[in-house]
Amino acid sequence: MTKLEAVIQPSKFEAVKDALLEIGVEGMTVTEVRGHGRQKGHTEFYRGREYTVDVLPKVKIETVLPDRLVDSAIQAITNAARTGKIGDGKIFLSRIDEAIRIRNDERGETAL
Amino acid sequence: MRLVRKFLPLLLLFVSIGSLAAQTPSAPADPAAQIAQLQQQVADAKGSADNAWMLASSALVLMMTGPGLALFYGGLVRKKNVLGTMMQSFAMMALITVLWAIVVYSLCFGAGNSFIGGIGHAFLRGVGAPPDPDYSGTIPQQTFMIYQLMFAIITPALISGAFAERMKFSAMLLFMGLWSLLVYSPMAHMVWGKGGLLNASLGGRFPTLDFAGGTVVHITSGVSALICATYLGRRLGYPKEPMMPHSVVLSFIGACLLWVGWFGFNAGSALSAGALATSAFVATHFAAATAAIGWAGAEWIRNGKPSALGAISGCVAGLVAITPASGFVGPMPALLIGLVAGVGCYLMVAKVKAALGYDDSLDAFGVHGAGGTIGALLTGVFATKLVNPIFKDAQGNALASGMIDGNYHQILNQAVGVLIAIVLAVVGTYVILKIVDFTIGVRVTAEHEVQGLDLTQHGEEGYYWEASLP
């Protein structure tokens, strides 16, 4: 099982979520985060002073997938979220040791 | 029962005619007595109109503090300090009320000397339904008292903008109590109290035209704010760390409430419901408008974009500046006063503050101190007897008010009033800060400042919006 974390632009969230559901992803956890990669922030003025806001709003989607779905998930996310500009985001993959369904103690891929 | 229902309309008719007849006292036979009675009824009617407006104005001015100022300041601070900041305004509504009732009204408006009133009205003795003709002949003195209380409440609350996010709640309460006794009372007495040194309507030695409190409210609080800001020192992390308003939305709502409430502040200072109140109302509104344009326009030119915060700050600056002038100047000068204040206060806040480096967190000095000074001096320029014949000769003829009437001397009197306000605020505030700091300490610890006032001073959080908490 693989955990997939995608940090994307908030405006792309709906499209990415729909794309994932379409390829058979059954669960995800979504959080609103702030961050940046190479994307510069923007400047704001407060009382005549200029401030650089460099941590920008993003959306993080976490989902644990059976290995067979990982490639199509990556494809789905990049197609839905890509604009070609800096700030599109990143996807990280990591191994998951175990998954357990709280409701009925199911383990492994059936718990996903 | 059926009989009653049948005759009910007729019964009601008789009852209403009867009660109407009962209300109208029977006219005395003697014509002179009749006229006297009619005159009394006219006076009562006029008094009712004045009293209605004054009670409404009192409510409007209280609204300026809560929630007006509470929201305006509350939105400008960081989230962890929102309740602490709002409490600083709200506490005044409670604390100053009690002090006022006990002795502060008397110190402000009781008969005393040129600098302070006496304790003749302590515990509001003698303050009842009969008017005090020195102040207003048509409204109960109790109305005058409650109206003035609302001013005494908002004035110290304004100072809290300077020490936002770092003053101990207990220290603030002690400070404000002493401030209302040692700074507000003398200033209010000098400008508005009978026998006051600066009182323009009651023959003060240096008649300062201050219709609704440019010197009494804004300069004193604004200058005190500067002293507090420098005494307490900068917030941790200022100015490197950005400390953005956590909710300009709240500030926006607060500012609009201030604008509307200010009609009570300025037009109510006419102490009557006639043409002077209207004139002050109009001047107030006009100044707010051009000041908002001035500040926002200055930002547009300097930063490329007019901010919402700038626009609302501008309108407050204009309202501050027009406060002393409102019942003395015409509508066109009001437009100009507003514009000057909007641009002037913007420069104070955006350039001067940054250059001098003090942390007047919410710009109490930049807006109230500077705006009040601008307004007080321009009052000397634009005051006209055509709006308000405040100066009269022995025969009762109106004399020139300000520069545009030909009285070039008035602006000097205004300067005297401004100077006295500044000196009183500086000295008084410094002394009080020393006392409070020596006894209980004014500033929160660094650790508490980082945690925030809401948690450390009040044991609360302003918003429980995390999804994880029930």
Image: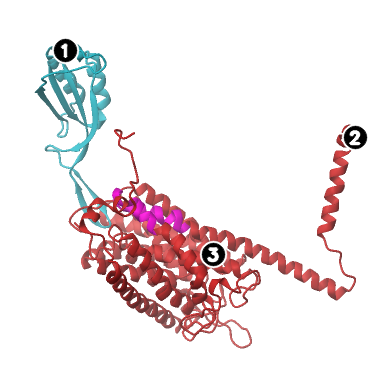
Chain colours: A cyan, B red
Q: Position of residue B168 (x, y in %)?
A: 30, 61
Q: Chain of mark 3?
A: B
Q: Mark on residue A109?
A: 1
Task: Give the tally of numbered discs.
Answer: 3
> Which residue is rendered at x = 67% and y = 67% of the image?
B47
**Number of residues whose C-alpha sits closer than 10 Å to that of mark 1, classed few (under 14), some (14–19) or many (20 or more):** some
Q: Which residue is mark 2?
A: B3
- Residue B450 appears at what percent x and percent y? 22, 53
- Residue B386: give x, y in percent of width and height: 56, 74
Secondary structure that dominates the magenta span: helix
Residue at 22% from the left image edge and 18% from the top image edge? A20
**Picture quadrant of residue B368:** bottom left
Q: Quickly name the residue at label 3.
A: B267
Q: Is residue B25 above or below residue B75?
A: below
Frontmost residue, B66 versus B263: B66
Q: Let me know if residue B457 appears in the view.
A: yes
User: Mark 2 belongs to which subunit?
Assistant: B
Q: Amino acid at mark 2?
A: Leu
* Along the viewing direction, whichever of B430 and B136 lies nearer the viewer: B430
Q: Is residue B75 left or right of residue A111?
A: right
Task: State whether residue B63 is above or below residue B227.
Answer: above
Mark 3 and mark 2: Cα distance apart in space: 56 Å
Q: Amino acid at mark 3?
A: Ala
Q: Is disc 1 in the same subunit as disc 2?
A: no
Alpha carbons under labels 1 and 2: distance apart: 86 Å
Question: Magenta segment: does it hold A109?
Answer: no
- Three-letter residue code for mark 1: Glu
Q: Give the magenta part as a residue range.
A: B64-88
Label 3 and label 2 in one chain: yes
Mark 3 neighbour density, 10 Å: few (under 14) some (14–19) many (20 or more)? many
Element under label 3? Answer: helix
